Amino acid sequence: MTSLVAVEVTANLPYRHTDDLFIDGQWRAATGTGRTLVTNPATEEVWGSVPQASGADLDQAVAAARRAFTGTGRSVRGAGNGWRDLAPAVRAGYLLRLAEEIEKRAEAISHTNTWENGSPVAESSRAASNAASIFRYFASLAGLLETVDIRPFADGSGETVVRQDPIGVCALIAPWNFPINLVVAKLAPALMAGCTVVIKPASPTPLSVRLIIDAVVATGLPAGVVNLVTGPGSFGDALVKHPGIDKVAFTGSTPVGRSIAGACGQLLRPVTLELGGKSSALVLPDVDLDALSQVLIRTCMRNTGQTCYISTRILAPAERYDELVDMVTATIAAAKQGDPMQPDTVFGPAATRAQEQTVRAYLRSGVAEGARATTGGDVPSGFDQGFFVKPTVFADVTPGMRIAREEIFGPVLSILRYDSVDEAVALANNTTFGLGGTIFSEDPDRAFALAGQLDTGSLGLNFFASNHAAPFAGRHDSGLGAEFGPEGLKAYLSPQSVHRRIR
Ligand code: NAP
Ligand code: MG
């Protein structure tokens, strides 16, 4: 058995046990009574904790965000002194400085993130630079907000000036798998648009996001523009339904997303939902297996399989099925699992005990339904502590199996067989989700044409990566609306059409 205790000496963890929330520009003691404990999933050590905010704390955070949004002025543009009233270029300046402050905290962000959710440092060490690049991208869109958009009436009788107002006070609710970037993907466009925010992180990962707040303080953002509150899922529900909230942005599971959509539907409150997925890697017969092997883990099992868009179902042509299963098995089996603080670790533990148990149940269901584990399976992890699950490859998977249909959110790949490309397309589209996906082929034109047949929001040809300038938008059970790109900024804006006669 392998022990993982030696990591503590070097970890840079500025926050451990905390009593406060960030409201109206200052850390202040929570008035709620409960606490949320933070567990290192690699060691099972409870090393941190945060307070659970009360309803009164929530009221104060929302009220502070409202004051910061409107300032004391009455006008949306020009006359007021709220965040919404600043020139877009001025807000962009804040975003650029915030990016620098976040980069200064890269190591603390990485280590805190890894201690919270077990993401290998090879992954979490990129969180700060990625967050900074997201702020820089949205800062670069300031010009879009300054463009005067005038649309003439068809009969020449007048024109309409279309202005874009910030929506208002936004609730940002994030999951635990990428605790920095899934907050920043909302925070950056919200701030650029002129909105103010109340952030609720996921309960397993409430500490790393405090480093973002430290960067906000160091940047000198006006009080109340960004607020951070912590609490359980029921607190997230109260935030979504709070009368002072104008828009909700959520990333997380499909069931919680549905419940938030229901509440927002009732309230007629704009909402953006980035939810789960079950994406496919469609491997064409002309695939270069060596090249696929190089990107396999990042594309299909990134972050120990805890990434929403990864291609966890591999669709393999019958004539190359055995060869592909052998390559995938060998690649996954050779990748190092272990202490996520070690730079060469590829797979860490599951983020929580509950997630470990969920994944193990899927491993048992795969076997019970007739799939064949070629590596891994529901076997002892080999570690004497931690929520480790062996990275697993299932061959002989058929479309009806639960492991072929449901999001597992763990290090599990399912390899299905197809005879014709039409059958492969049908298999890829045979899902209630529509988030990511990949096509592997040596023929770029054929792959590009095939992309048009796949019913999914994003698709990679021979690799997958997100581009801050392009919309990331799940279809069907994968969500509503888009993050990133100008589309992601638009989600925080509300148009106002002013019709006038031409003088
Ligand atoms: P989750 O259970 O849906 O939780 C997400 C967030 O919502 C957490 O902050 C959670 O708080 C909060 N929450 C729970 N119940 C709530 C409610 N009734 N109302 C409002 N907020 C509530 O998801 P998770 O377990 O953290 O994350 C895993 C899931 O996220 C996976 O399904 C994955 O596919 C999805 N995901 C999607 C994307 C994407 O962009 N499409 C990206 C990453 C992850 P607590 O933690 O306090 O319960
Ligand atoms: Mg959850």
Image: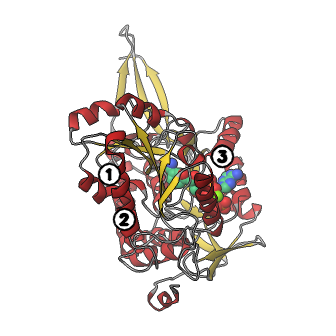
Residues packed near mark 3 inside 10 Å, few (<14), some (14 to 19) or many (20 plus): few
Residue 307, position as x, y percentages in the image:
48, 56
Viewer-proximal residue, 52 or 296?
296
Cα–Cα gap, marks 1 and 2: 45 Å
> Would residue 353 appear left or right of 480 to someone viewing this image?
right
State the residue at coordinates (65%, 64%).
357
Q: Ligand 1 within 8 A of label 3's CB?
A: yes
Residue depth check, mark 1 versus mark 3: number of the one nearer the observer:
1
- The residue wearing badge 2 is 99
Q: What kind of residue is marked 2?
A: Ala
Say if residue 372 shows up in the picture. Answer: yes
Considering only order in the chain, which callout, 2 or 1, is on the residue closer to the N terminus? 2
- The residue wearing badge 3 is 255
SS category of the residue bearing label 3? helix
Considering only order in the chain, which callout, 2 or 3, is on the residue closer to the N terminus? 2
Residue 289, position as x, y percentages in the image:
27, 52
Cα–Cα gap, marks 1 and 3: 38 Å
Q: What kind of residue is marked 1?
A: Glu
Ligand 1 image-quadrant field: bottom right
Say if residue 68 shows up in the picture. Answer: no
Instruction: Looking at this view, name the residue that lies furthest to the top.
Output: 155
- The residue wearing badge 1 is 323
